[in-house]
Image (spheres, rainbow, N blue to C red):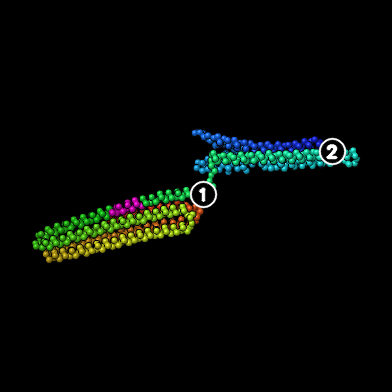
């Protein structure tokens, strides 16, 4: 090594060491310090552009230009514009600081990793020059004679001067680089912070935190579910009302038409029988016509009783319609309580205990409504039994009247006896047909109410299972929202009930037509 250094001219070694120190310092200035200065200048220019910005109709703001921050930061700014456009279309804000973070913005452009090794490299070059100078000075020292010693000391002094010169140059350049670099970096970071603040103040505000966003999202979902529940309640109430009205209107009309037709037929038949009987009695009897008139008066009274029985039948039918309306009211109450339950779901954060108590109260109210419906059905069956008892009394009374007429006819004459027998047979047929009519009506109404009660039980059971499913859901982001699939299932249950009512109506109409 000594011979190698001795063979290299001293001026060349000096030029290499000092040139390396100068080259490294120049590279750090160009690659690290100047990019920070330029980035700070571009950011401050962008801040001034935002402060002076005026948006005119038909033109877009200056900050929407991809080169708004210059070519060095074009990639980050273009990425921010792409995401901000999508969020702005949905009414949301985009945080500009996430896309212009200092660690990502200046790392590649200002060659931060190179800047971290330049001070150490400059110090290493200074130390290398020191060692070379010491080797040059000490290596040429000759102590054999006074002259050689003096010459060696002068050479050693030159080597020591070179050693100290390179050390001082490396340390000074390293110190100057650190000062300029960190000052430039601080200026760029301040400019970046100023730009973020100005952009948030003048263009796009900072978005809300994730926790606040989740709370707002849950509130919006709760409001949407409340609106959906109100709309569903309205549609269900109107649909059930229309279905029940459409289903029972033809039944009432058919019953009224049938009763009117049967009553008219009975009146016409009795009129023909009485006219024939009177005509034959005028020919065959004499003084017994008064008794026959009294008998006919009894028949008229029986017809009045029949009319009252028909009125009782109509009253029972009206009672059935009232019970159906009461059932509709109970269904409306269940729907209103379900709406209250949906409203209570939005307040589920108050505690699981309160939620359980409210669920128990709701199920108790539903049980009370079901009990009221059962009581109404029992009253309907009691009214039907009373109507059958009245019809049996009417049939019994009619039989007694006919027996009295038969006895009077036997006492009057044989021919009158034949006429009375014919009248008895006609009355018996009439009573059988009327009893069959009452039995068909009773059976049809019982079957209709049974099917209606079964469908209501199915609907309430499905609703109870759905509510139990909602209560069993765990709390969380998805636990605060009622599933739309559950609402669709409840709509399907209501549709099934309407279909069952339509089938019952068809069956009763067919029965009425067959009678």
The answer, for residue 493, to whether it is visible in the render is: no
Whole-percent x, y for residue 263 in the image:
22, 56
Residue 110 x, y percent position in the rendering:
65, 39
Quarter of the picture containing the C terminus is bottom left
**Of 495 and 57, the residue lying toward us:** 57
Residue appearing at x 46%, y 56% in the figure: 470
Quadrant housing residue 5: top right
Task: Give me the residue at 84% from left, 39% from top.
Answer: 156
Query: Is 243 in the magenta?
Result: yes
Q: Which comes before the other along the chain, label 2 or label 1?
A: 2
**Label 2: which secondary element:** helix
Q: Indicate the quadrant containing the N terminus: top left, top right, bottom left or bottom right.
A: top right
Mark 1 element type: helix
* Residue projecting furthest to the right: 145
Work out how far the residue at label 2 is from the one at label 1, CA to CA, in angstroms: 79 Å
Q: Quadrant of residue 65?
A: top right
On the image, the x and y values in percent for residue 173 come to 72, 39
From where the camera sits, is residue 356 visible? yes
- Please name whichever residue, 507 or 288, is drawn nearer the observer in this view of the structure: 288
Question: Which residue is at a point 45% across and 48% down the rendered structure image?
Answer: 224
Total marks drawn? 2
Q: Is residue 244 magenta?
A: yes
The one nearer the camera, 362 or 386, is 362
Tell me: 382 left or right of 103: left
- Where does label 2 land, which residue? 155
Magenta stretch: dominant secondary structure: helix
Tell me where residue 462 appears, x and y as whole percent. Answer: 41, 57
In the image, which residues are magenta? Answer: 239-252
Q: Could you say which quadrant of the image residue 426 lies in?
A: bottom left
Q: Residues within 10 Å of mark 1 (few under 14, many from 20)?
A: few
In the picture provided, is 387 more to the left or to the right than 229?
left
Task: Tell me the residue that label 1 is attached to.
Answer: 214
């Amino acid at each position: 090594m000594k011979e190698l250094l001795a063979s290299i001219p001293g001026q060349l070694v000096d030029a290499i060491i000092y040139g390396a120190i100068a080259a490294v310092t120049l590279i750090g200035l160009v690659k690290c310090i100047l990019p920070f200065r330029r980035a700070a200048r571009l950011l401050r220019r962008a801040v001034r552009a935002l402060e002076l910005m005026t948006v005119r109709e038909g033109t877009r703001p200056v900050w929407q230009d991809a080169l708004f921050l210059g070519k060095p930061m074009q990639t980050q700014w273009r990425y921010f514009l792409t995401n901000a456009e999508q969020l702005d279309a949905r009414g949301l804000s985009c945080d500009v600081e996430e896309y212009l973070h200092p660690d990502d913005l200046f790392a590649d452009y200002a060659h931060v990793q190179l800047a971290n090794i330049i001070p150490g490299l400059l110090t290493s070059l200074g130390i290398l020059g020191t060692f070379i100078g010491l080797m040059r000075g000490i290596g040429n020292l000759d102590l054999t004679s006074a002259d050689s010693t003096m010459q060696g000391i002068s050479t050693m002094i030159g080597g020591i001067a070179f050693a100290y010169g390179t050390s001082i140059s490396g340390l000074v350049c390293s110190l100057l680089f650190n000062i300029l670099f960190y000052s430039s970096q601080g200026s760029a970071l301040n400019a970046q912070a100023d730009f973020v603040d100005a952009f948030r103040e003048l263009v796009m505000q900072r978005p809300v935190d994730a926790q606040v966003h989740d709370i707002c999202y849950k509130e919006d979902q709760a409001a949407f579910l409340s609106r959906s529940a109100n709309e569903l309640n309205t549609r269900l109430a109107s649909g059930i009302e229309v279905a029940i009205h459409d289903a029972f209107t033809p039944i009432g009309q058919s019953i009224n038409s049938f009763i009117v037709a049967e009553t008219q037929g009975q009146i016409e038949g009795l009129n023909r029988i009485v006219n024939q009987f009177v005509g034959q009695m005028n020919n065959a009897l004499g003084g017994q016509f008064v008794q026959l008139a009294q008998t006919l008066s009894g028949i008229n009274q029986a017809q009045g009783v029949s009319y009252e029985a028909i009125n009782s039948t109509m009253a029972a039918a009206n009672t059935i319609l009232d019970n159906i309306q009461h059932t509709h009211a109970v269904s409306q109450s269940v729907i209103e309580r379900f709406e209250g339950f949906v409203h209570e779901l939005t307040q589920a954060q108050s505690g699981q205990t309160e939620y359980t108590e409210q669920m128990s109260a709701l199920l108790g109210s539903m049980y009370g409504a079901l009990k009221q419906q059962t009581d109404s059905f029992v009253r309907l069956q009691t009214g039907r039994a009373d109507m059958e008892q009245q019809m049996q009394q009417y049939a019994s009374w009619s039989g007694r009247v006919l027996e009295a007429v038969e006895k009077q006819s036997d006492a009057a004459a044989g021919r009158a006896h034949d006429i009375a027998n014919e009248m008895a047979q006609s009355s018996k047929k009439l009573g059988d047909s009327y009893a069959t009519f009452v039995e068909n009506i009773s059976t049809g109404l019982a079957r209709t109410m049974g099917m209606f009660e079964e469908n209501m039980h199915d609907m309430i059971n499905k609703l109870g299972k759905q509510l139990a499913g909602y209560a069993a859901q765990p709390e969380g982001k998805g636990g605060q929202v009622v599933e739309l699939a559950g609402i669709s299932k409840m709509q399907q249950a209501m549709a099934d009930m309407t279909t069952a009512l339509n089938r019952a109506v068809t069956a009763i109409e067919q029965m009425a037509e067959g009678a």
